Amino acid sequence: MKFLPIFLVLLLSACAALNAPGDRKEAAAANTDLGMEYMNQGQNERAMEKLKRALEQDPASGPAHAAMALLYTRLDENKLAEKHYRKAAYLEPKNSTFNNNYGAYLCANNKVDEAIKYFNRVLADRTYPSPENIYTNVGMCLRQKPDPVAAEENFRKALERNPRYGKALAQMALLSYEQEDYLKARAFLQRYESIARPGRDMLALGMRIEKNLGNDVAAAEYAYKLRSSYPGGREPYAEALENRL
């Protein structure tokens, strides 16, 4: 009977241990975490390397698929991104983060009805900590459909749960402006400004609201803030507001 050298026995034992299902899952989780960390640092190539390795180690890892979806979204690889968003949601159908991410992706790609199905999965989760965010996401999706009545209904549901939720207040201001209800738009913008510093789009919106209400002094104040705070270029929505004049 021949005996294997002791170092070879140890090596084979280590390989067997690494190939155990539990160890491969742990390794996949570790590589997923590393991939996300590299993504946060803007190191997309290294992130891709780690996430591919994670999926090799555990093809059924929802977090690895979800992370890969985010990376492909960042790289504008839409078909591959959707594949991994869908896979993550399929593997963990009760994971509200995965469902919300996939819904947001679908909405951004004009697949409104399908997106709302995934948002509704999140709303069915009574433990989800911020349903106001999901109602606002649904409203934003319906606003682009466009279905302004249903959009407003969802924004108001969000504000019923959190009257100081800035994202919903901003969306109500934008929706009201689009419907040419300038007084209501002003009211929601003022509520938004009471809790958050307005960014480029909100300053541009305020300027247009006041101009349409005939308040040239307030419009000029918004214009000054816009120029002084953001001297280089404007966001797309701000440009769209400009073009409506």
Image: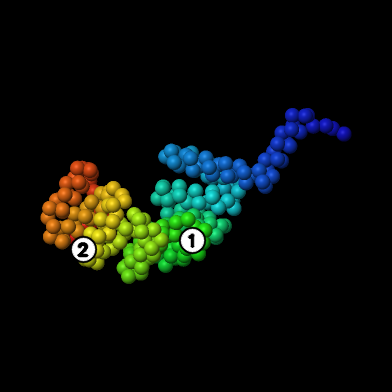
**Which quadrant does the N terminus fall into?**
top right
Give amino acid for label 2.
Tyr
Give amino acid for label 1.
Val
Q: x and y percent of residue 208 in the render?
A: 19, 57
Q: Is residue 137 left or right of residue 27?
A: left
| Residue named by callout 2 | 182
Question: Camera-side residue: 79 or 208?
Answer: 208
Q: x and y percent of residue 67 in the render?
A: 49, 48
Label 2 crowd (10 A; few <14 / some 14-19 / many >=20): many
Number of numbered tags placed on the structure image: 2
Callout in the foreground (2, 1) = 2
Q: How is the image coloured?
A: rainbow
User: Looking at the rendered structure, which numbered label has been put on residue 122?
Assistant: 1
Please give the name of the residue rendered at 42% of the width and 51% of the height, measured from the top-left corner: 73
Q: Is residue 203 left or right of residue 77?
A: left
Q: x and y percent of residue 183 in the render?
A: 21, 63
Label 1 crowd (10 A; few <14 / some 14-19 / many >=20): many
Question: Camera-side residue: 240 or 94?
Answer: 94
199 lies above or below 95: above
Question: Camera-side residue: 153 or 61?
Answer: 153
**Which quadrant does the C terminus fall into?**
bottom left
Q: x and y percent of residue 222 in the render?
A: 19, 50
